[in-house]
Image (cartoon, rainbow, N blue to C red):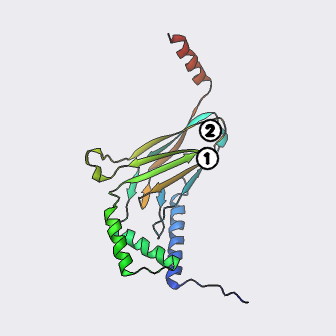
Amino acid sequence: MVLKQKVPSQAVSNLLEQNQSMVNANNDANRHGLKEMASDSLGQNANYQITLKHPSAYKNSELYIEFDGIKAQFPSLNDRLNFVAQRSLMSNVPFSHGDKLNYLRDLTNNQYFNSFILQVESHHKITPIQQLGIDNMSDYEPKTQALINLGYSKKPRKTINVSFYKAQQMSFKHVRVIAVPFGQHYRQKNDSDSKTGP
């Protein structure tokens, strides 16, 4: 029995080429540090990993990551509908007019209203930062900065994982990793506090 390799259609090949171009552009944007997070042509958000150059400098420390100048771009309803159609195309699943209407109804009832979630994971600690949507009225406040405490670790940490949801693209002016050592100064402070206590 001879198995024939299935050749992707031209439409699928075009999507794959488009995705590769987006990956290349995103890699270029992040060549000197995390500046931009993006989704692909199917609307699937990429996950990112920050590699710490000197892991030993972060051991016995409380680690923070700071995001400054946060900006987010969001897909329109038409964009989200196109993402569904393109995922169907990639999966070789029919996308009928009835399917389109059902998805359009669902997407209309579940709009993002410029809300997003930025999630950071390090050393088994996951911390989400949520931007509420503009439909939250008085509770809405644009997040342009975030400082996330990733906790204390005795061991060196080599990587920090960053992911995002709902937004189509996120960009940052600066992303900084800050280590606060729990060394002699910390112990002296505790000793001092205990002496001044009741």
Is label 2 in a helix, a strand or a loop?
Answer: helix
Side of 160 where 173 appears, left or right = left
- Residue in the picture at 38% in, 59% down: 73
Label 1: how many residues lie within 10 Å, few (<14), some (14-19) or many (20+)? some
Secondary structure, mark 1, is loop
Labels 1 & 2 near each other (Cβ < 8 A): yes
Near mark 2 (Cα within 10 A), the count class, few <14, some 14-19 or many ≥20, is many
What residue lies at 67% left-to-right and 38% top-to-bottom? 155
Q: What residue is pinned by disc 2?
A: 58
Q: Nearer the viewer, residue 75 or 188?
A: 75
On screen, residue 100 versus residue 88, left or right, reads left
Q: Nearer the viewer, residue 119 or 158?
A: 119
Say the numbered circle drawn on residue 186. Answer: none
Disc 1 marks which residue? 52
Measuring from the top left, give residue 129's x and y in whole percent: 44, 46
**Spatial CA span between label 1 and label 2:** 9 Å
